[in-house]
Image: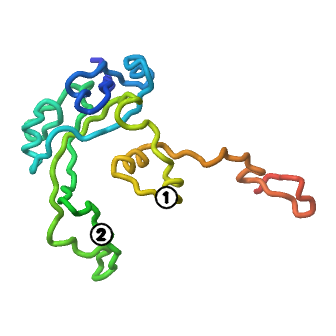
């Protein structure tokens, strides 16, 4: 029996809502997504829809879109571009930050006991899709190193974009003078020999 491996076909759309309801097309690779959109695209994951207090309520609302471990139901392999994620609920006038915890190293435990009261959370549907570059948000986020040095105040969407982008060098890497297992002769530093 021959089994076929199916790639996930991500929607091509201007935002997550359109990715669920009326995408321009579906594509597994960037070049296919660019062809469907007829312009540049960027791969992104965004929350969509209402927040649910429990995972079970979210599973009931998005039946057929996400894996349901209660019933064993799951979408087709090419339709696995949605997932459920638990997020901290931010109260009006407060921040979503949790205070960092220092290791305690007491009584054979590395970390202290967790706080008695957990932060309030909600479940959201996260949609991964090819976002059209000219839509809503800019395609390029500032480089993390530059944003930190200039001490910019960044919103949560920009921070997520910075975290998702690949690392880029500040300047091109210079060629190495010598290899890892080579050394310069002490009597003539211009000669490089293998190091044993």
x and y, in percent, of residue 146 in the image: 53, 53
Q: Are marks 1 and 2 in contact (CB under 8 Å)?
A: no
How many dots with numbers?
A: 2
Dividing the image into 4 quarters, which one contains the N terminus?
A: top left
Q: Residue at x 37, y 37 (%)?
A: 137
The answer to whether 159 is drawn above or below residue 185 in the figure is above
Taking depth in this image into account, of 81 and 161 the one nearest to the observer is 161
Q: Position of residue 21 (x, y in %)?
A: 20, 25
| Residue identifier under label 2 | 99
Quadrant position of residue 190: bottom right
Q: Is residue 152 left or right of residue 79?
A: right
Q: Nearer the viewer, residue 173 or 189?
A: 173
* Residue 182 at x, y percent in the picture: 77, 53
**Quick check: 170 left or right of 9?**
right
Work out which residue is located at the far right of the displayed protein and give it: 187
Above or below: residue 35 compared with residue 117: above
Mark number, residue 158: none
Q: Residue at x 43, y 47 (%)?
A: 162
Name which of mark 1 and mark 2 comes first in the sequence: 2
Q: Residue at x 34, y 75 (%)?
A: 103
Q: CA distance from mark 1 to mark 2?
A: 20 Å
Q: x and y percent of residue 123 in the render?
A: 16, 47
Q: Secondary structure at mark 2?
A: loop
């Amino acid at each position: 029996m021959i089994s076929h491996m199916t790639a996930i076909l991500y929607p091509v759309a201007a935002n997550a809502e359109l990715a669920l309801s009326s995408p321009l097309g579906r594509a597994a690779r960037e070049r296919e997504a660019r062809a469907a959109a007829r312009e540049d695209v960027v791969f992104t994951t965004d929350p969509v829809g209402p927040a649910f207090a429990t995972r079970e309520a979210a599973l009931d609302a998005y039946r057929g879109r996400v894996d349901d471990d209660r019933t064993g139901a799951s979408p087709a392999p090419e339709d696995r571009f949605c997932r459920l994620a638990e997020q901290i609920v931010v109260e009006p006038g407060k921040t979503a930050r949790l205070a960092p915890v220092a290791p305690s190293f007491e009584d054979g435990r590395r970390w202290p006991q967790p706080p008695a009261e957990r932060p309030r959370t909600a479940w959201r549907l996260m949609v991964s899709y090819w976002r059209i570059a000219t839509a809503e948000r800019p395609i390029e986020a500032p480089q993390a190193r530059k944003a930190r040095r200039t001490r910019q105040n960044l919103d949560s969407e920009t921070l997520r974009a910075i975290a998702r982008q690949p690392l880029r060098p500040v300047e091109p890497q210079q060629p190495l003078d010598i290899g890892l297992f080579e050394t310069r002769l002490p009597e003539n530093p211009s000669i490089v020999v293998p190091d044993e």
